[in-house]
């Protein structure tokens, strides 16, 4: 059951000029969270901006009841959030989302993320590694200035490939090219993805062609975050053309089996 609370900001780190990592004290949310869950954050006491902002859970420190999330400043809401200082109280609801990453029945996991979509994948990689799964991670960034969390992911992966579109750091190209090669070499029995829509579509297609189970986390725009406003609809793949059916990403997702949704 999601909980609403004021969580103390106990640590704040600037990872990039516009990317921040927040650690907040939220033991009950931590206790009930799974890889793939997200939280909704109210950034002011005023009505501007009125809506909460959805942010994925990056890391759960279960011993200390600390929840960590990472966000990029995009507009007014995240700009206000970025200005909070250690000691302030963050108005947060979580954990949200019923659709979380289900990795327990697989052994050779391929985790692929792009840009700020890598954040919700860390807790998944960490938990899978702890459960003695083989974790291969494929992270793609636009160029060297956008690269984040390289060491963190390396520490929870058996193999890791990091790509930049322009080759300015690590391997040149798209992360999916390396994933495809490993699938062909028989090294992958399941795929978990989060990132920009073109990347998700490509991963969805690849998984279908290769017949590999694949779960994708969608970051649709959201208003309420609890299934009440219909603001985050995604079409189900199997619904008839003349009577389309939709799911709420905030409630049924954000993680879906890739072949179940039309993106
Ligand atoms: C389930 C979920 C998990 C998310 N997790 C993270 C996360 O871990 N870290 C992170 O940095 N961001 C995450 N996002 C995106 C984040 O919620 C938005 O960037 C944020 O709400 C923007 O608020 P704002 O007021 O700063 O910007 P706004 O003024 O609302 O918008 C500024 C710009 O950001 C774009 N934007 C707004 N919402 C989204 C969205 N959902 N996806 C893509 N672009 C958007 C707008 O189109 C606009 O161009 C997540 C979104 C969802 C739905
Ligand atoms: S955000 Fe309101 S229904 Fe999903």
Image: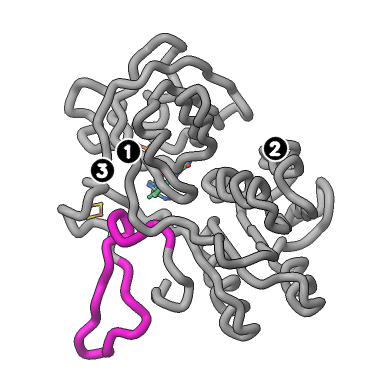
Q: Which residue is mark 2?
A: 152
Q: Nearer the viewer, residue 120 or 75?
A: 120
- 3 or 1: tag closer to the N-terminus: 3
- 2 or 3: tag closer to the N-terminus: 3
Q: Which mark is residue 1?
A: 3
Query: How far apart are labels 2 and 3 at the CA level?
Result: 30 Å
- Point out the image quarter for the C terminus: bottom left
- Considering every residue shown, the one lying at the far top of the view is 87
Magenta run includes residue 135: no
Q: Is residue 65 above or below residue 57?
A: above
Residue 34: image location, x then y, percent: 45, 47
Q: Report helix, strand or loop for mark 2.
A: helix
What residue span does the magenta drawing correspond to?
Answer: 234-255
Magenta run includes residue 249: yes
Instruction: Using the rendered view, name the quadrant where residue 198 is placed.
Output: bottom right
Q: Which residue is mark 1?
A: 94
Residue 76: image location, x then y, percent: 35, 31
Question: Could you tell me if the residues under marks 3 and 1 are in contact, i.e. CB atoms within 8 Å?
Answer: no
Question: Could you tell me if the residues under marks 2 and 1 are in contact, i.e. CB atoms within 8 Å?
Answer: no
């Amino acid at each position: 059951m999601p909980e609403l609370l004021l969580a103390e900001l106990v640590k704040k780190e600037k990872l990039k000029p516009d990317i921040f990592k927040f650690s907040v004290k939220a033991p009950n949310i931590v206790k009930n969270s799974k890889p793939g869950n997200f939280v909704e954050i109210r950034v002011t006491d005023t009505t501007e901006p009125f809506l909460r902002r959805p942010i994925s859970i990056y890391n759960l420190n279960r011993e200390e009841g600390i929840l960590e999330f990472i966000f990029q400043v995009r507009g007014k809401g995240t700009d206000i959030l970025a200005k909070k200082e250690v000691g302030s109280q963050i108005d947060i609801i979580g954990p949200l989302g019923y659709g979380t990453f289900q990795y327990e029945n697989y052994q050779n996991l391929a985790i692929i993320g792009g840009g700020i979509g890598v954040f919700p994948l860390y807790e998944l990689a960490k938990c899978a590694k702890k459960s003695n799964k083989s974790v291969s991670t494929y992270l793609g960034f636009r160029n060297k200035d956008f690269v984040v969390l390289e060491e963190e992911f390396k520490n929870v992966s058996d193999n890791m490939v990091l790509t930049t579109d322009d080759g300015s750091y690590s391997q040149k190209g798209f992360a999916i090219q390396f994933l495809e090669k490993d699938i062909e070499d028989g090294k992958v029995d399941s795929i978990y993805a989060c990132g920009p829509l073109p990347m998700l579509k490509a991963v969805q297609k690849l998984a279908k062609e290769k017949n590999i189970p694949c779960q994708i986390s969608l970051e649709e725009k959201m208003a309420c975050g609890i299934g009440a406003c219909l603001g985050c609809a995604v079409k189900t793949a199997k619904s008839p053309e003349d009577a389309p059916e939709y799911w709420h990403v905030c409630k049924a997702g954000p993680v879906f089996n890739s072949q179940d949704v039309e993106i």
